Image (cartoon, coloured by chain):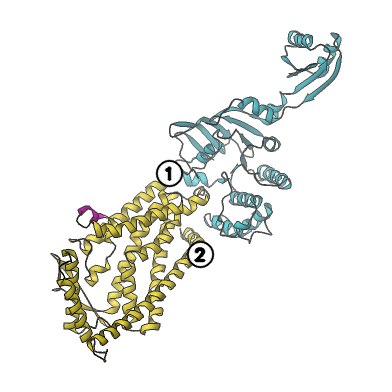
Amino acid sequence: MPQTPVLELTNLRKTIKGKDIVKGINLTLHPSQIFGFLGPNGAGKTTTIRMIVGLIKPTEGSVKICGYSVAREFVKALSNVGCIIESPDMYQYLTGMENLLQFAAMNKAISQQRIKDVIEMVGLQHRVNDKVSTYSLGMRQRLGIAQAIISKPKLLILDEPTNGLDPAGITEFRNLIRKLAYDEGMTVFVSSHILLEIQQMCDIVSIIKQGSVVKTANIQDLLQDNDKIEWQLSDPETAISLLREHWNIQASQLKKNTISANIGPHPLDKLNEFLISEGLALTYCSATRNTLEDLFLDLTVGDEIV
Amino acid sequence: MFSLIENEVIKMISKKRLLFVIAILVALISVFAYGQHHSSERIKTQLSQRMGISATTDWHKLADQQLIELKNRLDSPYRDEKDKSALRVRIEQLQYNLDNDINPLEQSAAKFTTKFMEQSIFLFLPLLIIMLASDMVSGESSSGTIKLLLVRNVPRWKVLLSKFLTLIMLEIIVLFFAFVLSEIISGLFFGFGGWNAPVATGFKLVAGKLDTSSVLNVPQWRYTLMVYSLAFFVSFVVGSISFMISVLVRSTAASIGIIMSTLVAGNFISYFLSDWKITRYMFMVNLRLTDYLSGSFQPIEGMTLLFSILVLLGWASASIIISFVYFTKKDILV
């Protein structure tokens, strides 16, 4: 029996003042997945997130959370969501604790114990009784995460969650997200522009460009078939044509004696043997695993902010 | 719903806006009470000097003197008809007081408490309410916390309703403090009492003249109760309108600015454009509800208590409807 997806976006569109901000996004997320939502500024990430949580209404298409439509069964759908949108805005004139109590009061299922646990989870126990106006950005971010997970949501949506966190905080945060996803079974939806973050944290990635998703894939697959090899050898022109004729590999010349290529599934040792047997003097060879950043730049190149 | 209202109350108390409003009340009532005390003393000595009466306790003579002054002003050829009918109204009232042995000069905490509200109802009280109401929704929009409220498993109309009910509670609290503070502060000047003194009400304006045919005396406490009930109604109306502005506008400053300038504009519209029929349907010129009780002159002829109440009720209900419809539909982009 197929599981009900935690999040299902069907042909989601938004037009604001005649401009297509989001142009038909389809997406299905299952329990315990960590999903990375990537895109340059102005690509429509936040607009999409706002539509998911019902802050803005889609021009077309639908959002379903745990099978409930946000448009028609708002309360049921939103019972399963915790989120931070854009920035962790809190009531500055209240303490961290009072802020959490505000949100706890809106949901009867939240116990005092849960509030305590959440504060410890995000590491705010020493400052929770201070006014939020005295918090640093990192502490506000932690409080933001605390209010998002306080109701034990099935879907956790985090928009730029590591903004303002220090390196130790980021590592801590990454572990917390993994724990929430794999131990508590939350589906986590992270949007970020820090690509390394997404690469280290997420299972699945979508790259969005000018309102449409240009690629969705498992992050391992996405990076694996993109190993890039660099050779330093005596006769680059010959090497390029040899590689093309015998292995069907498109290589390009980088520097005077350097060529590079994506070798796909071909084994590197066989390729090196081949080049040497063809009489080329191979002085250096290196393999670089493609980072998400390369991929991201490849896919979104020439993008302009709409 | 109860916990939502509790949340709003916690926020309101933490923001210290209410405290600020109460501090303004204390300051203004003190100044007003002192001024009242000072001027009534001065009038008494002035009158007694001019008339050569040493026994200022004989208020009949002072009232007679006041009456003569008013009549002189009425006879001045430079006054236009509108001013004249206002004077006539005042004279008829004073005459009525004399005939029925009701002392118009006698001060008491009860009288002050009532007078303070009568004077506040069209500008000062609305301003206090605006300070509280304008921030209710736009405050959350400008700080971005509105997002946190609206992504909970609570429908939007409930969030807004909790805010609106909190506002009504605040209106009651403000009136309660206005009453208690003016009673206490003025009591120190004039003595606590006068709640059973008779007050004339039931004046009607017929063709620009005061019709005293249905005037009757009610005890001060009943009159005060009527004044404060009307004040609550005015607070409710002004509160609803500024609440709507607060829903429509994202910044609190803009929201306060819009409603305040409207209110102040209303005060001179009723002064300059009283011939223009449409102005009587504006809420700002209908706020002086207590004038109908005391028989003071209305800004625009042909308006009655019922008319004003209906106009205000129309404004309030339109504001509430617009607030809820807009709030439940709008895209939150902050």
* Tag 1 residue: B330
Q: Main secondary structure of the magenta part?
A: helix
Q: Residue at x 24, y 57 (%)?
A: B272
* Up-down relation of residue A269 to residue B264 (above or below): above
Left or right, residue A1 beside residue A219 = left
Position of the N terminus of chain B, as image quadrant, is: bottom left
* Chain B visual colour: yellow
Question: Magenta span has B147?
Answer: no
Left or right, residue A153 beside residue A75 = right
Q: Chain of mark 1?
A: B
As measured in the structure, the alpha-carbon distance from the residue carrying label 2 to the one carrying label 1 is 29 Å
Q: Chain of mark 2?
A: B
Provide residue B164's location: percent of width, then percent of height. Answer: 41, 57
* Up-down relation of residue B174 to residue A210 (above or below): below
* Tag 2 residue: B16
**Residue B158 appears anywhere in the view:** no
Q: How many marks?
A: 2
The lab-note entry on whether marks 2 and 1 share a chain reads: yes
Q: Residues within 10 Å of mark 1 (few under 14, many from 20)?
A: few
* Chain A visual colour: cyan
Q: Earlier in the sequence, mark 2 or mark 1?
A: 2
In depth, the one of A75 and B271 nearer the eye is B271
